[in-house]
Structure formats: C-alpha cells, structure tokens
C-alpha cells in the first residue's frame, strides 16, 4: 500500500508505530463526536462528471453502484455492510497509486475509483465509507483505521501499512472490520493479523490516551471532500 500521511515516513512514521503498538480496536472507538449529516449527492451531476471523464464504461460502473444503494436502502444493517463490502471488493481491482494515478499518494473519490475500477486500500475504504453514510449509518460509527497488516502467514514477522474500515455499533463496541483483503466481515478479535495504529473519520483523529483532534490534520481529507463536491457529491 502506498503510504497516506507524511507521518508514515522517517522519524514521524516510527513514532506513530511505536505509539500504535499498545492500541486495541475497541479503544479506537470510545471517543465519539456528534454525527455527521447524511451523505447525499446529485445523481445527474455525478453521471455527467463520470461520462466526461470515463465514458460509457464509467457510467455503467456508477449506475451499478447507485443501483446497489437503492436496493440496500432500509435493509438490516448487517446486510448493508456485507453488500457494500462485497461490491467494492469486486468492482475495484487492487493496485498502487503509482500505477493508477502516476503519483506516490492519491486518495481517489468514489467516482474516480469506479471510473478506473482500480485503487489501493484507502480507495476501497473511501468508497465503502461514503456508501454506508448514504445508507444512513451515523458518521461516528465508521472509522478509517490505519493498521499494520501481517503478511506471510501466522508465524510471519513481516507487515505492511494498510487501511480498513471499522464499524462500531456503539462507542464501546468491538468493531467489525471491512477489508479489501478479505470478503468476510469479522470482529476485530478475529483479525489478529491486523495491528491498529490510529483511526479517523469526519469528526476527528483518534489515538488511545489522547483527546481527538481535527480531521483536517489529515491533509488529504479536505482535498478529497472538495473534489467530491465538484463531482456532484454532498451538494
């Protein structure tokens, strides 16, 4: 995975990983801010944006996503989580920003990920996060969670920087983990291969033992939201 924060480089990266060694998933969910407003969009503007940038194939992918959201509206929460996770894991091919965007680090909007049908772990999480917000989940129930993902089997000591989406039913709940590396949604206790570092959402950045800080410190976040609004999201 291409790193997503300057802090993941050099001394700041090492400091974050040291701080993250004692984190647990449940602790990342205990400080919840007021809910964000419902996520909305202008379907006609999205389709126009998609057609201009990615043509008929892009519009077809967008319409598939819009149809998913329509069919999942009002369904039980577990069904929505499963459908959204499966959709994004299927429609986006795992890749790297250097290949898809010829940039070291780029956070794609849901429209861009659908248009390219390729992205890295952050792009999967972005698509799932905004899908679930549109379906009515409260913003504070969802977290972008940075983890160290162990690779190479149970005995391996190798790990890579990775991002997953956490769903917290309540502030004290153990989260369910939505991951592009695994279609099955499992409780955090059943993902010993993931070591959480810190998490964030629109309400803030969360590190165990510290007060939440503004999500604007995640430099890519305001830029992502601005580009989404230009495309037709959150009118």
Image: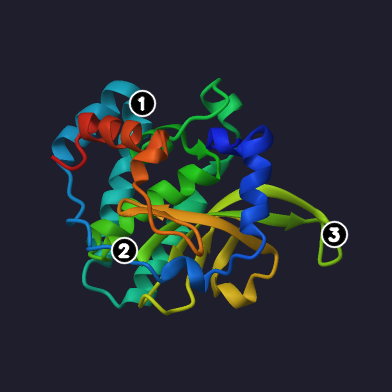
- The quarter of the picture where the N terminus appears is top right
x, y percentage for residue 136?
22, 65
Give how far apart the Cα atoms at labels 1 and 2 are: 33 Å
Q: Nearer the viewer, mark 1 or mark 2?
A: 2
Q: Is residue 58 placed above or below 135 in the rendered structure? A: above
Colouring chosen for the image of the structure: rainbow
In the structure shown, which secondary structural element does the residue marked by tag 3 occupy?
loop
Residue drawn at x 43%, y 79% is 173
Q: What is the total number of numbered labels drawn onto the structure image?
A: 3
Which residue in the rendered view is the most extreme toward the right?
A: 155
**Mark 3 and mark 1 in contact (Cβ < 8 Å)?**
no
Question: Which residue is more in the foreground, 210 or 153?
Answer: 210
Residue drawn at x 51%, y 37% is 118
> Which of the 4 quarters of the picture holds residue 73?
bottom left
Q: Which residue is mark 3?
A: 156
Relative to residue 204, is residue 47 drawn left or right? left
Relative to residue 165, is residue 231 drawn left or right? left
């Amino acid at each position: 995975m291409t790193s997503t924060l300057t802090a993941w480089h050099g001394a700041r990266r090492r400091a974050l990983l040291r701080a993250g060694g004692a984190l647990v998933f449940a602790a990342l969910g205990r400080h919840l801010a007021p809910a964000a407003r419902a996520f909305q969009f202008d379907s006609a503007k999205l389709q126009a944006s998609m057609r201009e940038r990615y043509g008929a194939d892009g519009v077809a992918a967008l319409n598939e996503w819009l149809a998913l959201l329509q069919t999942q509206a009002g369904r039980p929460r577990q069904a929505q989580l499963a459908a959204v996770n499966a959709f994004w894991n299927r429609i986006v091919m795992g890749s790297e920003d250097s290949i898809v965007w010829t940039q070291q680090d780029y956070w794609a909007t849901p429209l861009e990920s659908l248009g390219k049908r390729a992205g890295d772990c952050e792009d999967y999480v972005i698509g799932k996060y905004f899908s679930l917000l549109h379906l009515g989940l409260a913003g504070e129930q969802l977290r972008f969670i940075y983890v160290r993902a162990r690779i190479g089997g149970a005995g391996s000591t190798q790990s890579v920087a990775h991002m997953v989406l956490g769903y917290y039913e309540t502030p004290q709940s153990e989260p369910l983990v939505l991951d592009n590396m695994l279609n099955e949604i499992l409780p955090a206790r059943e993902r010993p291969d993931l070591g959480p570092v810190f998490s964030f959402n629109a309400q803030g950045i969360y590190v165990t033992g510290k007060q939440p800080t503004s999500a604007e410190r995640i430099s890519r976040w305001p830029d992502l939201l601005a580009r989404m609004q230009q495309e037709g999201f959150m009118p």
